[in-house]
Amino acid sequence: MAIQLSSGPQVKRHNYQQNAEMNITPFVDVMLVLLIIFMVAAPLATVDVPVDLPSNAATPSPPPQDPIYVSVQADGQLFVQEQATSLADLSGLITGVTAGAKDTRLFLRGDQAVDYGTLMRVMNTLQKAGYTRISLVASEELEP
């Protein structure tokens, strides 16, 4: 048995080489966990709340010179300007009214009591006919 009688700290040197490379495994693990969390949380962020969207608080834009209105009444009756039509005849009537100009802006007016599916069927019919510039019309909000 030997005793070392030295004053002061003794520096112990190891024969290990220093590794200057960065270990990114924990970083990748954290990023994958975050990715999974966001993938699970994203579908839950959709809103399934019934809403009533009759009015608009934005300043109205100036109306065009010859607006073409497609109106859906509360009972589901469909009109182009003041002419009654059906959903099957809508694309032919719109093509006649616009003289085939597919870049014409159409204004879709729906009664507050009309269900959303009916408005979407009308919009899909207009889009299938080639009309992509469709604006929804709402009444102005009286009190902001």
Image (tube, grey):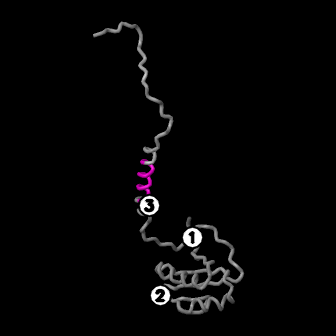
Q: Tell me, yes or no, whether the two marked residues, 2 and 1, touch with CB atoms within 8 Å.
A: no
Residue at label 1?
56
Image location of residue 74, percent across then percent down: 49, 84
Query: What's the amino acid at mark 1?
Result: Asn
When asked about the image quadrant of residue 7, the answer is top left
Q: Secondary structure at mark 1?
A: strand
Mark 3 neighbour density, 10 Å: few (under 14) some (14–19) many (20 or more): few
Residues 15 and 65: in front is 15
Q: Which residue is at a point 61% across and 67% down the rendered structure image?
A: 58
Query: What's the amino acid at mark 2?
Result: Asp
Q: Secondary structure at mark 2?
A: loop
Answer with mark 2 or mark 1, whichever residue precedes in sequence: 1
When asked about the image quadrant of residue 125, the answer is bottom right
Residues 74 and 144: in front is 74
Residue at label 2?
75
Image location of residue 53, percent across then percent down: 50, 72
Answer with mark 3 or mark 2, whichever residue precedes in sequence: 3
Residue at label 3?
42
